[in-house]
Image (spheres, grey):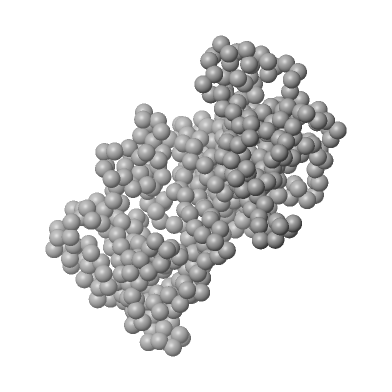
Amino acid sequence: MQGQTDTRQTQPARGKRMANSFASKTFTALSELHPNMANLKIIGIVIGKTDVKGFPDRKNIGSERYTCSFTIRDSPTHFVNAASWGSEDYIRSLSDSFRVGDCVVIENPLIQRKELEREEKFSPETPSDYKLLLSENHSIVKLCSSYEVDTKLLSLIHLPVKESRDYYSLGDIVANEHGLDGRIINVLAAVKLIGEPKYFTTSDRRKGQRCEVKLYDETESSFAMICWDNESILLAQSWMPRETVIFASDVRISFDKFRNCMTATVISKTIITTNPDTPEANILLNFIRENKEANPLDDEIDSYLKESINLNTIVDVYTVEQLKGKALKNEGKADPFYGILYAHISALNIDGEPARVVRNRCSGCGYTINEASSPCTACNKDSLRLKPVLPSLDMLIDVSDHTGTLHSCSLAGGVAEETLGYSVNEFLAMTGEQRTALKWQFLLERSKIYLKIFLSPRARGGLRISVLSCKLADPIEASRSLSAQGHV
């Protein structure tokens, strides 16, 4: 990228001289910005950042222009939004050159008065009347080494952009429920679990991603926050479960009808402060530390693997043939769909070696661990605080009815234990004969099966299917449901 420098190898002595020079008048403070200024140099810490986006170029039909934006701060009370438009190579190079938490120097930005009503609908709210525009031909962004920067500037990353008491507790959100649906609010919470990022391709062939983070506080044991952009996912992957507190300003709260609960979503307006330096955050940090040992994670893996979806909201009954047809109609869509099958399990290989259906998973994040004695590389960044690795039932089953078969459906965690009627430890203690007898109890009977279906090119048949519940069906209920569809 034009003008990009990385001075992380700077010697400490030179770093001290640089820090002194940064304290001089060579930089313009954000509080002094004015549209008539030119040839500016601004230094600050990046407190928020959005993904690179492409838009059709109206001047050149058939081509795209690209943009990225970020928020920079140079004092407790002053921060502004910066945006750049240009070619894909330039914008991606610019975006890749720094992350949230980095200090940067911006040279020759254009200062423009912001349009409050239009811009703050999609961008973080800032106290400044202005925004910075970066030109591919004239502006330069340089990455600064921490050696070069005054520690006061670095400490700004731990200051929320909103008043420290201006937030909802998770319990308040749950209690208000529909009253907060669609609202944009601030949240202070601790990080409980960080899900594995999921990647997909949209119907217009754009790449997408999704990551779910479980939050908690003194008032609520588990609350979902969804990240849809790569920048917030990268930030989330740096957090330590049960050791990190976040202040999330301007997240969207909505009611998830499938889970029958409230969730938070990170949007383009959101700025997340990790381990905020506020009295309220310190109180919450002390709470999670005091309760860490009192609440062992033995059952954490089950709550992670077993999705908290209200089964009562799933009412559509399908045959296997109908499910496959619906999947074809949904081609290109990223969201899953749900349904009920009255069918029997046609493949349930549980009477072989137990190791084939029992996996070791990290209790902190749910990742599969090859060796039970090995730490999880995804979340055990601190070797002195290793997360326990626990066994979990994890198998693939086939489900069949009179119209066809769904192959390789995932039956795992707490759902698998409820289906089989045995905990993972009880299952491991069974003999081969007992497991064979258990298998035939399901192969001969029709079950009522709740499914979650994702389109996945890498999965067998193009579908990734998870079993949410599987219990022996009531014969009368099954007959009525299938008769209503014209099938018996």
Left/right placement of residue 379 relative to residue 66 reads left
Note whether 216 is above or below 39 in the view shown: below
What residue is at 80 percent from the left and 46 percent from the top?
116
Q: Is residue 222 above or below residue 17?
A: below
Camera-nearest residue between 438 and 38: 38
Residue 146: percent from left, percent from top? 57, 23
Identify the residue shown where x is 32% and y is 37%: 375
How many numbered callouts? 0
Question: On the image, which quarter does residue 246 sit in?
Answer: top right
Q: Residue 196's x, y, as percent?
A: 44, 48
- Closer to us: 66 or 486: 66
Image height of 286 relative to 371, above or below: above
Residue 179, by quadrant, is: bottom right
Q: Estimate the x, y position of residue 190 in percent, counting from the top left.
A: 52, 39
Question: What residue lies at 83% left-to-right and 30% top-to-bottom?
Answer: 37
Above or below, comparing residue 379 to residue 25 in the picture: below
Indicate the position of residue 60 as horizontal and vertical percent values: 71, 57
In the drawing, does residue 125 fall left or right of residue 93? right
- Whether residue 172 is visible: no
Q: Quadrant of the C terminus?
A: bottom left
What residue is at 68 percent from the left and 46 percent from the top?
Answer: 86
Task: Identify which residue, 433 or 290, lies in the foreground.
Answer: 433
Work out whether residue 386 can be spotted.
yes
